[in-house]
Amino acid sequence: MDRIVKAFFNSAAGLSHAMRYELAVRQEVLVLLIAIPVSFFLTDNCWKRLALVGVLLIVLMVELLNTAIEALSDHVTPDAHPHIRIVKDLGSAAVFMALTLAGLTWLVALVERLV
């Protein structure tokens, strides 16, 4: 149980750091907080609500991983390096894919609600 508690506090510290220093994380958390109540208006189906909120949690997860990759890359070499640039671009592409999935999921739910 002690290990679980320590893991929780480590996770909370990481999220707290990201919220303080990463604009993208703050924006995605804000969207998530707005989206949770909006999901109740879009659908009565619990599984669809879970999907709507879940894709936004996936975006946040990928963003946190991308932030970690960028922080590690900057620690390894703060200078511009072509290989580090590729690593950062791949992380950015992963965030873009997660955002695309989230956008499509919400678009389908919205169209379904309006039709």
Image (cartoon, grey):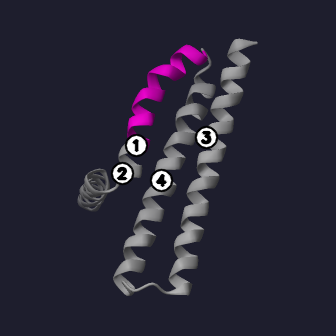
Quadrant of the image containing the C terminus: top right
Viewer-proximal residue among 21 and 38: 21
Q: CA distance from mark 4 to mark 3?
A: 12 Å
Marks 1 and 3: which is nearer the front? 1
Q: Which residue is mark 1?
A: 27
Marks 4 and 1: which is nearer the front? 1
Residue 90 in the figure: left or right of residue 24: right
Check disc 2: other Cα within 10 Å, few if <14, some if 14-19, many if 20+: few
Q: CA distance from mark 4 to mark 1?
A: 13 Å
Circle 1/circle 2 CB separation < 8 Å: yes
Disc marking residue 61: 4
Q: Which residue occupies 55% across, 63% down? A: 92
Name which of mark 4 and mark 3 comes first in the sequence: 4
Q: CA distance from mark 3 to mark 2?
A: 19 Å
Q: For the residue marked with disc 2, what is the amino acid?
A: Leu
Report which quarter residue 29 is drawn in. top left
Secondary structure at numbered mark 2: helix
Marks 4 and 3: which is nearer the front? 3
Marks 4 and 2: which is nearer the front? 2
Q: Which residue is mark 2?
A: 23
Check disc 4: other Cα within 10 Å, few if <14, some if 14-19, many if 20+: some
Residue range highlighted in magenta: 27-43
In magenta stretch: residue 51: no
Q: Which residue is mark 3?
A: 102
Please state the horizontal and vertical placement of residue 99, each as a whole percent of the image: 59, 47
